[in-house]
Amino acid sequence: MRVFEIRDDWGLDNLRPGQREVPRAGRGQVLLKMRRAALNARDLIVPERGYGRATGELPLIPLSDGVGEVVEVGADVTRVALGDRVCPTFFQNWVAGSPSAAAFASALGGPLDGVMAEYVCLSEEGVVKVPEYLDDAEAASLPCAALTAWSAVSGEARLRPGDHVLLQGTGGVALFALQFAKLHGATVTVLSSSDEKLARVREMGADHLVNYREHADWARATRALVAERGGYDAIVELGGAQTLGQSLRAIRPGGTIAMIGVLSGLDLSLSLGPIVTRQIRLQGVTVGHRDDFEAMLRAMAAHRVRPLVGSSFPFEGLKEAMAHFAQADRFGKTVIEF
Ligand SMILES: NC(=O)c1ccc[n+]([C@@H]2O[C@H](COP(=O)([O-])OP(=O)(O)OC[C@H]3O[C@@H](n4cnc5c(N)ncnc54)[C@H](OP(=O)(O)O)[C@@H]3O)[C@@H](O)[C@H]2O)c1
């Protein structure tokens, strides 16, 4: 079968097409014929061994997200059947509850082989059935970015109708967070570097729009929008080094900052005082578990929420898809067609 794999050494230049044997489904396993895959920010970090030893060993098949059809089931499989359309879970060993080191060591696309293969063999515990109303490209977009946004908005931030939420940027996680925050009845402020993208998120239901290039001090600009509440109830923190300081100023006392991304860097120096004196909750979020994936799919199906797909590339075009993903002007998920 055709695969893409990082071979010989780390680095994007070593990501190449290759051939592997089609795996067989053993006891408790299912074989998926992949239909679509989708890109996330981490898929550009993995080839550079960006997560250190946790990135895994070579050769490595990249990408965590996709959708496939069950074409073989091993003995004792009960959760899914032949012909089901399923998504792999990002963490293969995290079904519910608190994460463990073993759960975090079970991410697809590094350290475990990912979905850039025509056939993928997984434990039946590591897949979820996809609702019929979603097409393949939409379904492929869900395992990482959507579940991360759901874990932040519905899980850690415990949003209630009328709450105010601030989202950073218009990338994959942020667009899902917008859709889910609206589902929870929240009022949503979106930051973006682009007025064009802000116009598009307004069409998706965003209530307040702030261009963070024009308003470098966006904490001041946004606090005025939520002055009555003393700040935001929740902030989806995706920027990291350049944004966390401002998030600490924009959050209300007792509010939750869901720490998800570090798009502008990992290291910063800031005063810890407000976290203590304003009882701010800083909560790391790492994708999420299978139970929440299934809860998210139920909520999406009930409200017919559709992921926003931007561009599609053929299987052989993985590297072009990655180059496209790296561009600042893209909008919506980048999908690979098998
Ligand atoms: N913890 C987890 O489980 C988890 C899961 C998924 C992703 N992540 C991380 O979350 C981050 C976002 O992932 P993604 O897949 O959504 O990435 P993405 O699609 O590449 O997001 C890119 C967008 O982020 C916005 N952005 C960049 N720098 C910004 C800044 N300084 N302030 C505000 N917005 C900024 C930009 O929006 P505009 O173009 O609108 O300006 C940019 O288009 C990455 O760091 C990723 O590694 C973490």
Image: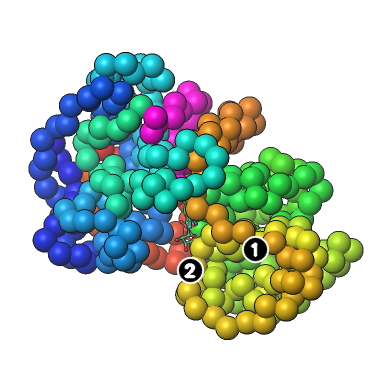
Left or right of 32, for residue 42 = right
Q: Position of residue 332 (x, y in %)?
A: 48, 51
Q: How many marks?
A: 2
Q: Nearer the viewer, mark 2 or mark 1?
A: 1
Left or right of 37, for residue 99 = right
The three-letter amino acid code for the residue at tag 2 is Leu
Q: Nearer the viewer, residue 277 or 227?
A: 277
Q: Residue at x 74, y 75 (%)?
A: 274
Q: Position of residue 97 (x, y in %)?
A: 55, 40
Of marks 2 and 1, which one's residue comes earlier in the chain?
Answer: 2
Q: Nearer the viewer, residue 324 or 290?
A: 290
- Quarter-wise, where is residue 167 in the image? bottom right
Instruction: Answer few, some or many: residues within 10 Å of disc 2's Cα (few below 14, many 20 plus, some between 14 and 19).
Output: some
| Contact flag, marks 2 and 1 (Cβ < 8 Å) | no
The three-letter amino acid code for the residue at tag 1 is Leu
**Label 1 C-beta lies within 8 Å of the nearest ligand 1 atom:** no
How far apart marks 2 and 1 lie (CA) works out to: 17 Å
Q: Position of residue 195 (x, y in %)?
A: 60, 66
Residue ID for mark 1: 282
Q: Give the magenta-colored segment's residue range.
A: 125-144
Instruction: Answer few, some or many: residues within 10 Å of disc 1's Cα (few below 14, many 20 plus, some between 14 and 19).
Output: some
Q: Nearer the viewer, residue 205 or 266?
A: 266
Q: Is residue 142 magenta?
A: yes
Image quadrant occupied by the C terminus: top left
Image quadrant occupied by the N terminus: top left
Residue 263: which numbered mark, if any?
Answer: 2
Q: Residue at x 10, y 43 (%)?
A: 19
Q: Residue at x 42, y 51 (%)?
A: 101
Q: Residue at x 41, y 20 (%)?
A: 79
